Image: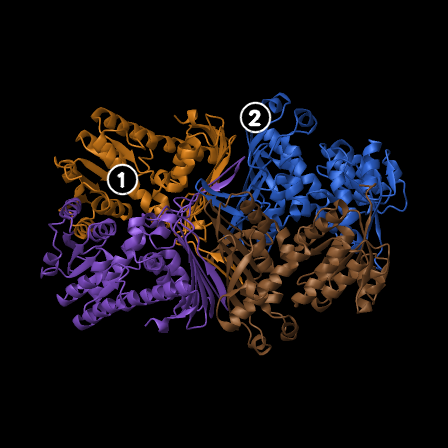
Chain colours: A brown, B purple, C orange, D blue
């Protein structure tokens, strides 16, 4: 390990997800140095840098882009900045890890794709759930033929608590903000492309979400190119915690995953038999997958192999989300070809 | 018990389901006597009668209808005879238990409903799954408010092996033949009425089923009057056995059922951790529910209470199945009001 | 079936277990007629006979023994009468099904064994748990070599509520009354004989049980002839219900069973994830095993095959219980050879 | 965090467990610096130091003891050195984390206890399983009264593969080498002291282990001061992987844990329903508990609170192991008072 080239990473965005990636890069992945952290909130950048013994903290992300010693950038800022930052980093010859979604506009996504292609840098999008051991196992069972021809795919994805209405207003809508993970998961598990979408969305959890123009409960049906049918069900509020499950069913068999819990204890008394609730939310459930995706990103840089979730994989779920939105509004199945 | 009036039942149809009901009536339900068995195949009627020590076996069902000592009739013959037999039995003042579906024609179902209403007899339709302890528990959790407002309902219903193509041709299609149970289950679990249906159906299991004009794989989405959204997924062939599960999700919590297995053993060796497959098919899985539904039918006769699944409950799933068929053919959501 | 000889059975004892066996014989097993029921409480015999349409009810069991048309006797009376009734029935040439334990005295058991051997009649002891699908599966896994050489056997057997102290006084002690089932299970699962026993017994549940000279909590360790080691843990009171599990571990693998529940539902809300408690007690848990053991008894009579649990199998657990009692009193391991 | 005093740790022993603790201290616990690594094998110390960017690597542990800047020592060398190293570290005023067992001799353990007491340093023994979330939950349920009075405690602890015979020869025997963790767990879960032990040990897995004078299969029964009864079952070889479970049963309820698996997938096909095997061995299963115990050790140093597993906790399991050994050899229950 000692003769391995150190990879220097700049982290842009010191919010919730930026903190996670910065800490994982700094402590969990050998051969990586976090050189700088930038955030428009200078204090946030400074505090995170101190905690992680990072040398530089900036309020201007351009100081990272312009630093020739930095090999790669982790884009953890707000969604509206993603495409620009990918382009800036790629133009500066830096590899890019970017949080999902790439953007709410296909046009801007395509510009980012072009910049990445032209620069020949590595780009990975933060669909971390692919790195969760449960979902990865389902993926592998499909890929190795254990499921046979895939017939039915089911994804359940329910948050423990809805975001505040102000967040909802800027989120692009539940399909772009939340279901986008499930659209990526649908592609990942099926190994096929979605061709048509039918979506039902409703406001059942919080009227304030409806007032903000969004929905909080949805069932989405997908037709895949390989003939499989998929269903996704979403809620912004599962009172028992973060509910993240999937099932693949085909000619050769079926595989399903359960939620993860803080421990395996089962307590029985006169009132019933009680086991633990699911891990509360994505920080708890997916912590290891955040490490794993970053490890793969660094490896891709080191080895020159393709990243496991490339920038095209970042575009597709946005298209599906757009089709889902149109389907919901027009109450009819919508083909992806109508969007693209 | 000894001073309870004996209920005399005639069973029409000595096929697979007729045998089950006749045996359950004869041995498992106190205070019932099976007086006669009729089947157009006289030998089948005779064999079953002998096995169960039933006094009379006929080839002509009218001998049962005309027998003044018979209180109730169990209609277990082919679907195309159901409506006529309900009408004949009702007109003769006999209570009727009738297998599902009542008929493939709403017009004929309505005639049967009228006959039952006019005669004032009891009529119960054979949606036995309502009596399965797993599904009954979900129903009770919804009814007692433990689920809160219902948001999402999921039903998985997959057979272990497809029926022969000849059977498929006469079956009325998968939605009327197989999914009809799930449509009833959706009403039972949700405590609400379906308003709109979107169905995707495909031939993935057996091309012969497609050649017979039917499908073998489906995902159906339901909108309920109470605002809940439902999904049903069906397959004619789950290689691991009969897969019968449901899940209800709402503002107060979630409840789900698992499949039943022949025993609870878990065997671990160097190759993995293996538990039992689901009970093979409906005879194994639902045997006790066949007893329970009949027990309730006999009680309803005895007590004069309403039957738990009345003839109107027999009509609704047929309407949903028709809407699902139209939805699949026209690839659009179909309102039940378009059918009725 | 119709040309099969009818087996006529007399049931002696119309208490809790007598009722179960009488009803199962009368309704669940084809080709059997319950001819008579005897109980020293004539009213109990009469009531049960009426309920099951049994022709004869006696207060004197000898009327059953003397009835030449009766082929078999089910002994469901109190333990102190078992040996005498086996002997009387055998001497009268009748097959005998007898509840456990055969007796509290080895001498009397041996007399019963002799009577059965001399008469050449079938004799089956009511170790019904062998017929439970969970335990039967473990047994089969051991027998078919899937466990390899058996190293460790674990049995958990806990009642939901202790019996009244008056019952305890006449019960022969927990080892003879309750653990005797587990001693039989240990032989059944291991396929080997117990050679040495070490038992710890305590009064933890109810001081009244201690005052009656008995214990209510125990852990028993067994050494088997095949080199396996077994542990049994018992309690008279598991507040969550009847806890009946076992585990077999060996060179080839491990298999374990779980408790049975009334349904498979799992309910998740803000307080936790709740599944059903075990079926309450032996009537619920083992109902089907009571049918199965009686079916095998009747088959053994019909076919002339050995019964699955013969009178020698009835003796061994009594010996183990005696060794366990001595071990507990003397706080040392006790060899079975010290007892026999 | 930035104004927190840095704790400087020296690690003695660069073998399997030394590597784990050194890496965890270096990367997973904020505010800790690993200053030096010592191993009689200088190359091993050097390699580990390089990997973790540790400044010093020594072949002589005394360089660590004599380094005034080092606050604490992690003793990860062979068991026969533990007591001396604790004493040397304590005498030098350093806090000590020491792997289990402290020693095979009570006399030497007592000397280590005295040295720690006299020096007033913190001392923690590496019973890491107490920090596993499964077992910690059982402990908490007992402590918070959810189990009520504890009646029965069961621990299953089986390794996936036996150690080499050479290792066995120096191990002090299975009770001191392997079961010692379970003896500590018994104290931890019961919240009580063991008073008497009865142990059965056999050679069932590997004759070479028997030839080395040890056993590989055992069942140990414990009597606790609080009246509870405990059973431990051990095997050096569970072909399905590392089997680590416990169960606590009392007047208020029961709680049990299951094994941890790499993912929650369940795969069903025509052959059966297959879930994942347990995590292979202690490195996989207990990795997070190694981090957690070290975090608590560092916190105890920082806060001046007692360590969660002190040096007296390191002594007791050795006494129990000695009693178990004598019990096995003499085939009788042995009181701890006979040993102490």
Q: Is residue D9 above or below residue A338?
A: above
**Crowding at label 1, few (<14), some or many (≥20) Cα neighbours within 10 Å?**
many
- Side of D39 relative to C207 (left or right): right
Q: Is residue B113 above or below residue A142?
A: below
The quadrant of the picture occupied by the N terminus of chain D is: bottom right
Q: Is residue B288 visible?
A: yes
Q: Is residue B100 above or below residue C5?
A: below
Label 2 is found on which chain of the structure? D
List the residue tagged with mark 2. Answer: D203
- Side of D81 relative to B288 (left or right): right
Q: Residue at x 30, y 30 (%)?
A: C311
**Crowding at label 2, few (<14), some or many (≥20) Cα neighbours within 10 Å?**
many
Residue A113 position within the rendered picture, expressed as x and y whole percent measured from the top left: 70, 59
Label 1 is found on which chain of the structure? C
Q: Secondary structure at mark 1?
A: helix
Residue B337 position within the rendered picture, expressed as x and y whole percent measured from the top left: 36, 74
- Rendered image quadrant of residue B47: top left
Q: Residue at x 24, y 28 (%)?
A: C116
- Side of C6 relative to B335 (left or right): left
- Side of C32 relative to D297 (left or right): left
Residue B33 position within the rendered picture, expressed as x and y whole percent measured from the top left: 16, 54
Q: Nearer the viewer, residue B282 or D185?
A: B282
Same-chain check, marks 2 and 1: no
List the residue tagged with mark 1. Answer: C294
Q: Residue at x 39, y 59 (%)?
A: B135
Q: Is residue D258 visible?
A: no
């Amino acid at each position: 390990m000692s003769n391995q080239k150190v990879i220097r990473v700049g982290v842009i965005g010191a919010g919730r997800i930026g903190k996670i990636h910065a800490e994982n890069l700094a402590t969990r992945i050998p051969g990586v140095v976090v050189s700088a952290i930038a955030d428009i909130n200078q204090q946030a950048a400074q505090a995170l840098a101190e905690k992680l013994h990072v040398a530089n903290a900036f309020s201007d992300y351009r100081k990272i882009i312009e630093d020739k010693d930095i090999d790669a950038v982790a884009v953890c800022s707000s969604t509206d900045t993603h495409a620009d930052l990918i382009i800036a980093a790629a133009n500066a010859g830096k590899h890019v890890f970017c949080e999902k979604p790439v953007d709410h506009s296909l046009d801007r996504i395509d510009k980012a794709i072009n910049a990445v292609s032209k620069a020949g840098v590595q780009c990975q999008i933060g669909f971390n759930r692919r790195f969760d051991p449960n979902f990865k196992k389902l993926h592998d069972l499909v890929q190795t033929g254990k499921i046979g021809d895939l017939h039915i795919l089911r994804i359940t994805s329910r948050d423990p608590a809805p975001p505040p209405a102000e967040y909802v207003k800027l989120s692009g809508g539940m399909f772009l903000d939340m279901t986008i993970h499930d659209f990526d998961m649908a592609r990942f598990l099926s190994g096929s492309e979605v061709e048509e979408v039918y979506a039902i969305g409703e406001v059942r959890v919080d009227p304030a979400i409806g007032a903000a123009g969004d929905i909080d409960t949805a069932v989405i049906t997908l037709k895949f190119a390989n003939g499989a049918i998929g269903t996704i069900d979403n809620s912004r509020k599962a009172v028992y915690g973060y509910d993240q499950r999937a099932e693949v069913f085909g000619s050769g068999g079926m595989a399903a995953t359960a939620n993860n819990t803080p421990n395996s204890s089962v307590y029985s008394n006169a009132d019933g038999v009680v086991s633990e609730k699911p891990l509360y939310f994505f920080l708890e459930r997916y912590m290891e997958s955040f490490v794993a995706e970053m490890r793969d990103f660094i490896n891709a840089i080191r080895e020159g192999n393709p990243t496991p979730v490339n920038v095209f994989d970042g575009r597709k779920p946005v298209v599906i989300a757009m089709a889902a939105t149109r389907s919901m509004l027009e109450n009819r199945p919508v083909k992806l070809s109508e969007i693209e």
